[in-house]
Amino acid sequence: MNTEYKKNTVFDLFPGLGSMSLAAQYAGFQVDGALDYQEKVQDVYEKNFAGKIRIVRNLREENCIEDIANVDVLIGRIPYSLLQAGIFHGNIMEEMNRTNILNILSYIIELKRPRAFVFAVSIKAGKERNWQHLMEERLAGDYKISWKQLDAYEMTGYPVYDHRIFWVGIRRDVRGMFLFPKEEYDYSCNIKDFLDDEATVKNCRYVDHLYPEFDGPVPAEPQIYCWSSGQYTLKEKLSYNAWKSPLVKTVHGLRKMSNREIARTKAFPDEFCLDGSESWMYRRLCDSVNVKVAAAVFRQLFCSLYGVWPDEAMLPEHMKRKKSPDVENWKGKNMMNHLVTRYFKEETVQQYKSDIGFRTLVESVNENMYIIPKYQRKYRWKKEQLTGLVESLLRGLPIPPIYTCRNSANQLEILDGQQRVMSLFFYYIGYFLDIKKNSSINFSELEVEDSSFAEALLKKYDLEKLHINLHGTNGEEINVDYAALPVEIKRKVDYTMITVIEIKIAQEEKREEILQTIFSNLNKNGSILTRQEQRNGIYTCEFYDMLHSFNRENQKWRKLWGREDAKDRDVEALLRFCALKKYIYLGKKQDGGREFKVEGYFDSYADMLDRFSKEAAAFQKEEIAEYRESLEGFVKLFESSNVLSAKVPLLEGFYVIYEKMGIREKISRKLLDAVWNAPTYKENSRQRTVNIRKMRERWKTVYEVWHGCSG
């Protein structure tokens, strides 16, 4: 079989009228050809595209597969009728022992090995899980696969109900990463923007007499009636029913929408040929993907594959971003005004500044009016830092503001300034961390219940008496403990003002998302927070709750790592294991052998962990439980009592082999030493340890030594 691929080309499976082919053309691809099972499609397709289309009766015929060109990208609009039946049927296709259409497509992809594929599936087909299962079972080993439900209204502004699931796969040996286009549009359109001039339809057969229930005042704007639940109903947006054309009511009366008008709502240009019987053409239009939505997907794919954006000049005028609100047939506000208005409407926050006395602030903390949210990092200031803050307080020097947000319990969550607030509180109560026993404290885990904050703190943690000594002008030590201050000085300190800024969010449903963004912006340029501490604040989700819970509560892990890390290096190690579980796979080498590959990894663990954290925020409970079970099973294998927090790459190597090669033998001190002292392991543990080649060599060494012991 010829395996020479034609660059920038696509081949369309089941094109129908060719909406996917048209979208691919607009995005810079060349359509090499198509294959369908409906004979009527051939005439329409060949009038609109240069590529040839073949009509087939059985996809499993060898010469049929040969006719599918070796192109860069395989594309397809999978018809609902095929998914509904799950097979080719009738006199169009043989049943082939009821072979599922999904398996046939995966067979074609495995055989042709395109650089990428894009398939669009109707939501009503209800086969999303089937697709997901098939992709994971058959194709995920060789392809990086993404899928998303796209809404034509959200992406184009067209007043239509039209949702499709797009599946995009990029072969793993192709460097590009695919991201779906943003769901935003330039203009919100009215249905009249898609209708013919009434003068051109004056001879159209109006049907007012068939639907007397729609009699009434002449509408100022056209109204749409769509078939739903056995009757026509007035709709704000157009919905497509394959057997009942929508009706439009204008000043001239009630009539059917023409196929040309329907085609415009799918973003077909007016010059696109729609020859064919009216009813057949209408059903094909209903099945078609919105060309503008699909073109946005293909433009993203083009950039992912070739590293450049396709020329926007390829887009027809009706699909280009508008530069003026006065463009004929395009109503609505100026694009920038529209986007700015929507942005501020959706995500505006307000800030309220208050100056609060020192004593009022710390007593409010003690009464639990100020709390530490779970996305905050641990408290880990040293006594020297606390002393510097106290000196600023006593001398009246500026203290940076505290950022807060009020929660549903009317408490103020501290977004930024936890270290300062809690240091001032320690000064007020006269206690501080016993560094020998607690180098850091996670205040968000403190169970306060009905007690004061100070009582709960002293009950849970080992604290020691705090004494603050400053140096006078002659170098003498001066004790400035809060309890020991003279009355007049204490009164001055009590009324020293500290700025507290309360942030109020307009949209409650976006509260968590906006708070995380604020937290990230407040901390991204600081040198105090580690990358993992920033992740803890940005990606608050059930998966992260599981990681922190496992890190605290799993005794085997605590023995393996040692005491909890103040900068969350232990949490980062667990996150690293989970990311490798998701992204590592055994891929083919050029010589036909197999080697470990890491999806989307380019010698930066930090970027990979950020990407994984973002994906983990959407994990379901079953997925989270699977990761926890994997971690629990792994740490149970260790018989060694050694603390291994300084040997994360070694732990990583054992986890990769445990997870991907299925070895379950116990890990002893002797085994750890054998790997650690192996020449190939040592050689690949010096400098640039995150280089993928060195990582592979270390994992290979772990496998050979561990497998040798288990064998």
Image (cartoon, rainbow, N blue to C red):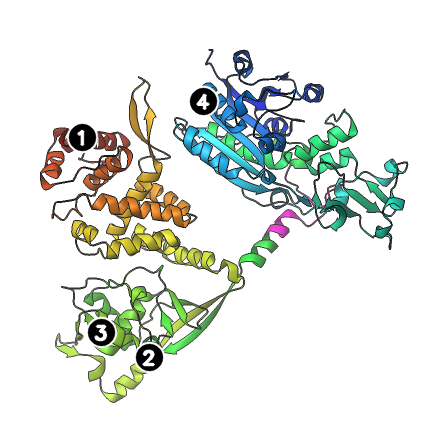
Question: Is 551 on the left-hand or right-hand side of 95?
Answer: left
Q: Residues within 10 Å of mark 2 (few under 14, many from 20)?
A: some
Q: Which mark is residue 392?
A: none
Element marked by disc 3:
helix
Whole-number angstrom distance, CA of label 2 to CA of label 4: 67 Å
Whole-number angstrom distance, CA of label 1 to CA of label 2: 61 Å
Secondary structure mostly taken by the magenta-highlighted segment of the chain: loop
Q: Position of residue 240 (x, y in %)?
A: 70, 40
Q: Would you place residue 699 above or below residue 112 in this image? A: below
Q: Which mark is residue 458?
A: 3
- Mark 1 or mark 2, which is nearer to you? 1
Instruction: Kindly identify the residue that appears in the image at 65 percent across and 18 percent down.
Output: 50
Q: Which residue is mark 2?
A: 363
Q: In the rendered structure, which disc, 2 or 4, sits on the residue that comes first in sequence?
A: 4
Q: Residues within 10 Å of mark 4 (few under 14, many from 20)?
A: few
- Mark 3 or mark 2, which is nearer to you? 3
